[in-house]
Amino acid sequence: MGSWGRLLLVPVVLLAGCTTAGRPATSATPAASAPTGCAARVEAGSLPDWADAGFSGDARMPHVFGAKGEIVAVLFGHPLAVGRTEGPTNKILWVARPAATPSPDPSAPATLVITATLDGTTTRVSREVAGGPGPSIIDVPQAGCWHLELRWSGRADTMDLVYVAA
């Protein structure tokens, strides 16, 4: 191999060491940071059509779908963090899929009630979003995987969200 060939080979070898072959371009929350039993899966693609009102263009935001697909949490403060003193807050925009049928209980409160349990513990906190799904700041007391039970307007869904230490 001539000197030009060796010169061109060096950048190729260096770049090969920097690739992430086999890893997707958009990543979910790393499994290493999520305790066993955590189903948190942060999507990085476009929001579904039913959840992109108010966004312009290609609405690509980190988001997590409820297990039943009835609600999506749009994460403005991704990654969610405990003890964050600077930077973005743990802002979550909750968007409910339009109901196929009227609420089973029209007198049910619209308030989004969140009951969160830290994976593998009995640590439980409750949060409320007045007026139902919409913008919120949802903080929890410690890092880990939180199992969320979500209830609003006679509807319910669940999801897992991971909070990291700031």
Image (cartoon, helix red, strand yellow):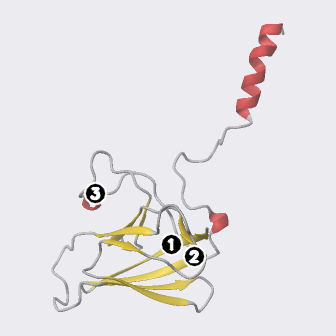
- Snapshot quadrant of residue 162: bottom right
Number of the label disc, if any, that sits on residue 145: 2
Above or below 159: residue 49: above
- How crowded pointer 3 is (Cα within 10 Å; few <14, some 14-19, many 20+) is rated as some
Q: Identify the mark nearer the N-term, 3 or 2.
A: 3
Q: Is residue 129 above or below residue 108?
A: above
Residue 10 in the image: x percent, y percent? Answer: 78, 22
Which residue bears the numbered disc 3?
52
What's the amino acid at mark 1?
Leu
Marks 1 and 2, Cα distance to the nearest angstrom? 6 Å
Q: The residue tagged with tag 3: helix, strand or loop?
A: loop
Q: Quadrant of the N terminus?
A: top right
Q: Residue at x 32, y 46 (%)?
A: 58
* Residue at the image position 60 percent from the left and 80 percent from the top: 142
Camera-side residue: 142 or 53?
142
- What type is the residue that disc 2 sits on? Cys
Q: Amino acid at mark 3?
A: Asp
User: Mark 1 — residue?
Assistant: 161
